[in-house]
Image (cartoon, rainbow, N blue to C red):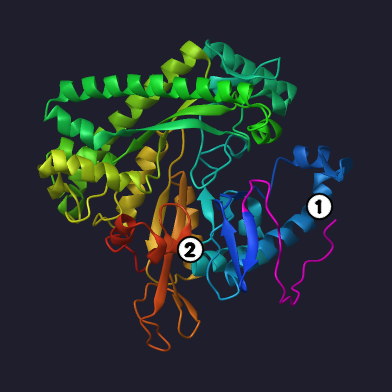
Amino acid sequence: YIQEISEVDYEGIIWSVNTDNETVIAERRGCVFITGNTPFTNFTIVMNAPRKTIETNRAIYSGEEVETLVSYENEAKMFLKALSELYFEGDSIGQPFTFPIPTIMTTTSWIWEDPEIHDIIFKTTAVRGSFYWLNTRIVDPDSSFAMCCRLAINRNDLVYTSNNVYTLRKDFNEAREEFTKIIERQRFGGLWAVPDVTGSVNVTTINLPRLVLEARGCDDKFWELYDNVLEIVRISEEWFRERYLMLMSRYPGMYSMIKWYLSEFPNTHFNTIGLIGLPEAAAIYLQNPVLWKEGSRRDWMRAVSIMDKMIEYAVWKAREWMVETGIPWNVEEVPGESAAAKLAIIDSKIFPELLSYFDNPDNPIYSSSIAPYYGSLDLSDRIEIESMLQKKFTGGVMMHIFLDQEPDPEALAKLTKKLVETDLVYWSYTPAITHCNTCGKTFTGLYTECPVCKSNNVDVWSRIVGYYRPVRNWNPYRRREFWSRKHYKSI
C-alpha cells in the first residue's frame, strides 16, 4: 500500500533491457537510446465514482481482494498529487514529458473541492499543458475512456450479451429496455461501456475536400460520391477485420500479446470511419477561399451546417452497418499527422484552384479539427463551433487551445468551469514551451530567443496533433503549419 511518496536523489541510469512491446532501452557511449516505437500511453484519471461502487467493490492486491476502494482514497490523492508534480517539473532538464498523456474528468469533485489538488492541477496545466479534459457533463465517464481523443458511442446501441460477447442489438428498443433492466439489477458489467481494452481494428479516412472538388459545385454529385466512398470504406474495414482474425488464427504465437491483453478482441474493437479536412471541405462547398480567415460569424454558421450534414451522414451509415452486421462502427476526427499534408499536396496538383483555400499555398495541409487552427476566430467562436459538432462524432475528437504565454492558473480554472457548461466534449490547453539549449532554462511561452541569455538556440515544444514534441522534430509540413496556428494571448 502507498504510505508515502517522496523525492529521492538518484544519479544512476534507470535500466530496462526491453519493455513488453519490445521497445529496447540501452546505453551506448554514455547515452541512453531507445529503439522501436515509444509506447503511446494514457492515464484516465477518474478521481471519484458512485458512493456505492467505492464502498462495495474491493481493491485487488497481489491477486487477492483487500479493503473496499473507499479505504484508499487518501492513497489515490497522494498518487494524483505526485503525478501532477512530476508533470509540473518536467524531465531532468525541464522539458515536458510526452507520455503518458493524462486525461481528467471535468466534473469530478476533487478538482473543485480539494484545495491541494485544485492548485497543483491548474498550476501544472498553466505551466505544462499536461492534462486533457473530458467533459463528463456531456459524456458518461463509465462509457468513455480517452486516449488523446474522446471516444463515446451511444451505449444503448450496444449491449453485453449473456455469452460474454459484445454485440449490437438489432432492435434498439429492446436494447434500451435491456439497458434499463440492467441498471435496475445494478449489474454494471451487463451493459456496453467503452472499456480500456477498446480501440479500432482499422481506420479508413475519407478525404472530404477531394469529394467536394470532384463534385464541382453539384450538390447531388457530392452526396453520390460520398456514398460511393463510404461503401469502399465498408469493404476495406471488413477486409481488414477478417484478415486480422485470419492472421491471429494462423500465427497465434506472433499475435500472442493481443490474445493476452485483449482477450475479447475483436468484439470490443471498432471499424472506424475517419474524416479529414472538414473546414476546407465546407469552404470549397461554399466557394469561399477566405471563409476561415476573413469570414463573418454568419459564414461560419453556414459552414457548421454543411459540416454537420457531412458528419451525420457518415454516422448514419455507420449505425446502419452496425444493425446489419452486429459489428461496432464509429466515426472519428482523425489526427492526420502526415496524411493531412500528403492528401492536400496530391489534390492541389490535380485541382490547382485548391491552393487559394489554404492559409499558406506553399504548404498545403488539411485540418484535423472542426474549426481550423489557422482561422481568425476568437476563442469564444472556436469553442462555440467545436461545441456544436464534437458531440456529433461517435469516435475521437479534440480541440486544442493554443497559448503563446503562461496563463493564470485561476483564470484557467474559471474557463474550465465555463467550458463544462458547454457541449464541448474534449479539449486541451496547450501553452507553447520554450527550452534554451544554451543556458538550459525552460520557459512557458512562445519565444524564438531565450529571455535570459538571448540565445537563438532554443527548442519550442507544442502538440503536433496530440502530444508534446519539439517543433524541430516534426515533419516539415507540420513544422511550417505550426507557425500559422492562432495562439491566444489571454483567456
- Is residue 148 shown left or right of residue 24? left
**Discs 2, 1 touching: Cβ within 8 Å:** no
Above-or-below relation of 208 to 80: above
Magenta region's main secondary structure?
loop
Q: Quadrant of the C terminus?
A: bottom left
Residue at numbered disc 1: 72
Question: What residue occupies the far bottom of the structure in this picture?
Answer: 453
Above-or-below relation of 252 to 427: above
SS for dot 1: helix
Query: Which numbered disc, 2 or 1, marks the residue closer to the eye?
Result: 1
Q: Where is residue 191 in the image (x, y as percent from the top left)?
A: 65, 24
Front position in the image: 63 or 424: 63
| Residue type beneath disc 2 | Leu
Q: Where is residue 39 in the image (x, y as percent from the top left)?
A: 58, 50
Q: Distance between the residues labelled 2 and 1?
A: 29 Å
Question: What residue occupies the far front of the structure in this picture?
Answer: 29
Above-or-below relation of 7 to 414: below
Q: What stretch is highlighted in magenta?
A: 1-23
Which comes sooner in the sequence, label 2 or label 1?
Answer: 1
Q: Position of residue 309 (x, y in %)?
A: 29, 29
Residue at numbered disc 2: 412
Residue 17 is one of the magenta-drawn residues: yes
SS for dot 2: helix
Q: Residue at x 66, y 62 (%)?
A: 83
Residue 107 is one of the magenta-drawn residues: no
Q: Residue at x 52, y 11 (%)?
A: 170
- Is residue 81 shown left or right of residue 318? right
Task: Tell me the crowding category of disc 2: few under 14, some 14 to 19, or many 20 or more residues within 10 angstroms, Cα based.
Answer: some
Q: Position of residue 302 (x, y in %)?
A: 21, 38
> Would you say residue 432 is visible in this rendering?
no
| Residue type beneath disc 1 | Tyr
Q: Quadrant of the N terminus?
A: bottom right
